[in-house]
Image (cartoon, grey):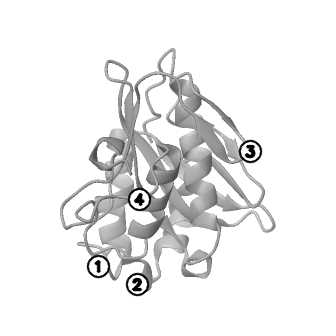
Amino acid sequence: MKTADKTDTFDSQPGLFGPTITVRPAHEGDFETLFEAASDPGIWAQHPSPLRYRREVFKTEFWDTAAQMGGLLMVLENTTGHCIGSSRFYQWNPADRSVVIGYTFLVARHWGGPTNSELKNLMLEHAFKAFGSTSGAGTFGLVGPWRSWAHSYPTNWSSRPVVSARWCCTTGLSRPPDDALSPGRSIQPDALARD
């Protein structure tokens, strides 16, 4: 497993610790653990690759891609230590101070609750610290220009509201424009309209 690039200003495989989850770098020996979390067909039902719950498809389309790109993160449940999903930072560009968060999935029992928000908040806080921003009391104070992107497939109806809410909140915007969640669009601060 390739480790993520670490620059002087950004570590795309951090250890992040929240109230209910821990995020850590994935290692070569983590395939079986991560595949066990990913083997529910329901996780991939809204994904363009709905067969990703199958071992061979998951290995080639998710695990091997992560091995080439680096930066794969495991999401662990604090109470049990079990792997409940994964996410990734990628396409870090120090020249324009941007990073992408994506390739996220969670086991179904963590859908609709606070886990995805906690995960995205931990990742965004890590990115903002790298950008020289500060945070406090669940809101982020931003210093200077930055971009944090989230990729979500147009048919992934469960992730899009969380992505939209996080990006609106973290950029100080109250809502995305009507077309921000249209098919094929990535949610990004520059695409959001100010009230």
Of badges 3 and 2, nearer the viewer stands 3
Specify the quadrant of the image occupied by residue 112. Answer: bottom right
Evaluate if marks 2 and 4 touch, with contact meaning CB atoms under 8 Å apart. no
Residue topped by disc 3: 137
- Amino acid type of the residue tagged 3 in the rendering: Ala
Residue, far front: 195
On screen, residue 16 above or below 8: below
Badge 1 amino acid:
Pro
Left-right relation of 91 to 136: left
Q: Nearer the viewer, residue 77 or 67?
A: 77
Indicate which label's residue lies in the foreground, 3 or 4. Answer: 4
User: Which numbered tag is attached to residue 175?
Assistant: 4
Q: Which residue in the protein does label 1 denote?
A: 50
Residue 23 or residue 154, whichever sits in front: 154
As measured in the structure, the alpha-carbon distance from the residue carrying label 3 to the one carrying label 1 is: 38 Å
> Which comes before the other along the chain, label 1 or label 2?
2
Badge 1 vs badge 2, beta-carbon distance below 8 Å: yes
Mark 2 residue element: helix
Per the image, the residue denoted by label 2 is: 41
Work out how far the residue at label 3 is from the one at label 2, CA to CA, in angstroms.
37 Å
